[in-house]
C-alpha cells in the first residue's frame, strides 16, 4: 500500500454533507445572497438547503431527472431543465413554479444559463441546439445557435456583458455567439475531437476556459480563438464542471475521477484537491468565495470551506506529490466507507 504524508499540504474536509436526494446529484448552485443553495438530482427533485439552519425543503419535482439549474441574478427565481425536455422557472420565496414549462427542445435540456440583466435564458440540449428565451414572455427569440457537428451541446455560459454566449460541444468545438443576432463571433475553436464538457469565462472575459473528456484544461483568447499556453492535464478523466471564483483568483474543476481541484487562475498551479467517493458533476462557489458546493454521484451534496491562506498566497501542491495523491485516493478513501470516514465533519 502506498504511504503518503499529507501533513504539509492543504487538505480540506467537507464542513457539511447534505443528504436528501436518493439518486445522482447533477447540479448545485449557491443563492446569490450566499445563505443557501439549490440542488437537482436524477430522482427528479429540486431541493433548497439553508446553510445557517442546516435545513432543507423540496422546491419541486419533475417528471424525470433534473440535469441543470440556474439562479436569476436577483436570487428570487431559479430555472431548471432536464429529461422532460422543458425549462421551468421557480420562485424560491413562494416555493412554487411561476413560469413554464417552456418547450422547444426535442431532447433533454442539459445546461442552462441566464444573462446578467435577467432578460435572456439560454438552454443547451442533446438535440444539438441552443435556444434563447425571453424570460418575460417565455418565448424562444433565437434558435440559430446550431453546432457545426453531429453531436450534442454539452455546456453553455453567458458573458456578463455584450450579450455573448459560449458553447462547448460533443465534437470538440467551442463557439462564441452574438446573442441578439445569432451570428457566430469566434470559432469554431478546436484542438481534437475530445468532447467539451465544461466552459467558463475569465473574470475580465478576455479569456475562456474549456474542460474536455480527456481531463485536459485549456485557455483560449476570447477575441481571436487562439490557444493560450500549454494544456493542463488536470484530471485523469472527464472534466464535468468548471467555475471561476468571484474574485477571479482561482478556478475549480470537477471530474469523473472523483476529485475537485483548485487552481491559481494566473499560473494554473494546483492549490488543493478535494477527494470524493464518486464522480463530481457540478461545483459552485459561494458569493464570498469562502465555500464551495459539490454535487456528487453518490446522491450527496458536499460543502467545503476553502483554505484561504493557500488561495490568497498562491501556494501550490508539488506536482510529484499531487500525482502520488491522485494514485492514493482509492487507498485513502476506499478501505472504509467514505461517509463513515467523513462523519466527524458532517452536519
Image (cartoon, rainbow, N blue to C red):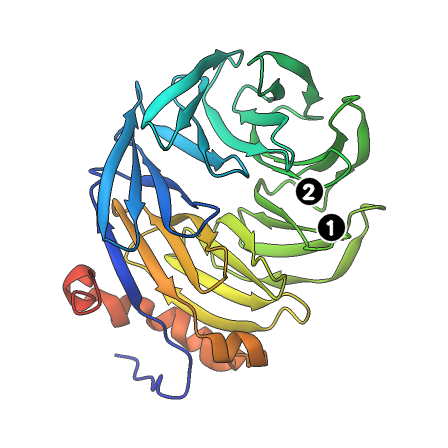
Find residue 136 and report its horizontal and vertical position in percent.
Answer: 58, 17
Q: Is residue 142 left or right of residue 59?
A: right
Name the quadrant of the C terminus.
bottom left
Which structural element holds mark 2?
Answer: loop
| In this picture, residue 108 sits left or right of residue 207 | left
Which residue occupies the foreground of this view, 117 or 239?
117
Q: Look at the picture and state if 91 lies above or below 176.
A: above
Q: Please, is residue 9 above or below residue 147 in the view?
A: below
Q: Who's the residue at 58% across and 57% down the image?
A: 246
Total numbered circles: 2
Whether tag 1 and tag 2 are in contact, CB under 8 A, the answer is yes
- Mark drawn on residue 160: 2
Residue furthest to the right in view is 224
Kindly identify which numbered label has been placed on residue 122: none
Classed neighbour count for the residue bearing mark 1: other residues with Cα under 10 Å, few (<14), some (14–19), many (≥20): some
Residue 74 x/y as whole percent:
53, 38
State the SS at label 1.
loop
Camera-nearest label, 1 or 2: 2
- Residue underneath mark 1: 205
Amino acid at each position: 500500500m502506498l504511504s503518503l504524508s499529507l501533513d504539509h499540504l492543504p487538505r480540506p474536509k467537507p464542513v457539511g454533507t447534505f443528504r436528501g436526494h436518493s439518486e445522482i446529484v447533477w447540479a448545485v448552485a449557491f443563492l446569490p445572497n450566499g445563505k443557501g443553495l439549490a440542488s437537482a438530482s436524477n430522482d427528479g427533485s429540486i431541493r433548497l438547503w439553508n446553510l445557517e439552519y442546516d435545513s432543507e425543503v423540496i422546491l419541486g419535482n419533475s417528471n424525470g431527472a433534473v440535469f441543470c439549474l440556474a439562479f436569476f441574478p436577483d436570487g428570487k427565481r431559479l430555472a431548471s431543465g432536464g429529461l422532460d425536455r422543458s425549462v421551468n422557472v421557480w420562485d424560491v420565496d413562494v416555493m412554487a413554479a411561476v413560469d413554464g414549462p417552456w418547450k422547444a427542445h426535442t431532447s433533454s435540456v442539459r445546461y442552462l444559463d441566464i444573462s446578467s440583466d435577467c432578460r435572456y435564458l439560454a438552454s443547451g440540449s442533446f438535440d444539438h441546439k441552443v435556444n434563447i428565451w425571453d424570460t418575460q414572455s417565455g418565448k424562444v427569440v433565437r434558435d440559430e445557435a446550431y453546432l457545426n457537428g453531429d453531436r450534442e451541446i454539452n455546456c453553455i455560459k453567458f458573458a456578463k456583458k455584450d450579450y455573448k454566449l459560449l458553447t462547448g460541444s460533443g465534437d470538440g468545438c467551442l463557439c462564441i455567439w452574438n446573442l441578439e443576432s445569432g451570428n457566430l463571433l469566434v470559432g469554431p475553436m478546436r484542438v481534437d475531437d475530445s468532447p467539451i464538457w465544461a466552459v467558463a469565462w475569465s473574470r475580465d472575459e478576455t479569456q475562456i476556459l474549456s474542460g474536455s473528456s480527456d481531463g485536459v484544461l485549456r485557455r483560449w483568447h476570447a477575441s481571436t480563438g487562439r490557444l493560450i499556453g500549454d494544456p493542463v492535464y488536470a484530471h485523469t478523466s472527464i472534466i464535468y464542471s468548471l467555475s471561476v471564483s468571484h474574485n477571479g483568483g482561482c478556478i475549480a474543476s470537477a471530474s469523473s475521477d472523483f476529485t475537485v481541484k483548485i487552481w491559481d487562475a494566473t499560473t494554473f498551479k494546483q492549490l488543493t484537491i478535494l477527494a470524493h467517493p464518486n464522480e463530481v458533476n457540478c461545483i459552485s462557489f459561494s458569493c464570498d468565495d469562502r465555500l464551495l458546493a459539490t454535487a456528487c454521484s453518490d446522491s450527496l451534496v458536499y460543502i467545503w470551506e476553502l483554505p484561504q491562506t493557500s488561495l490568497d498566497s498562491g501556494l501550490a501542491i508539488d506536482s510529484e506529490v499531487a500525482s502520488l495523491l491522485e494514485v492514493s485516493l482509492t487507498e485513502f478513501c476506499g478501505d472504509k466507507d467514505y461517509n463513515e470516514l467523513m462523519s466527524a465533519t458532517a452536519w
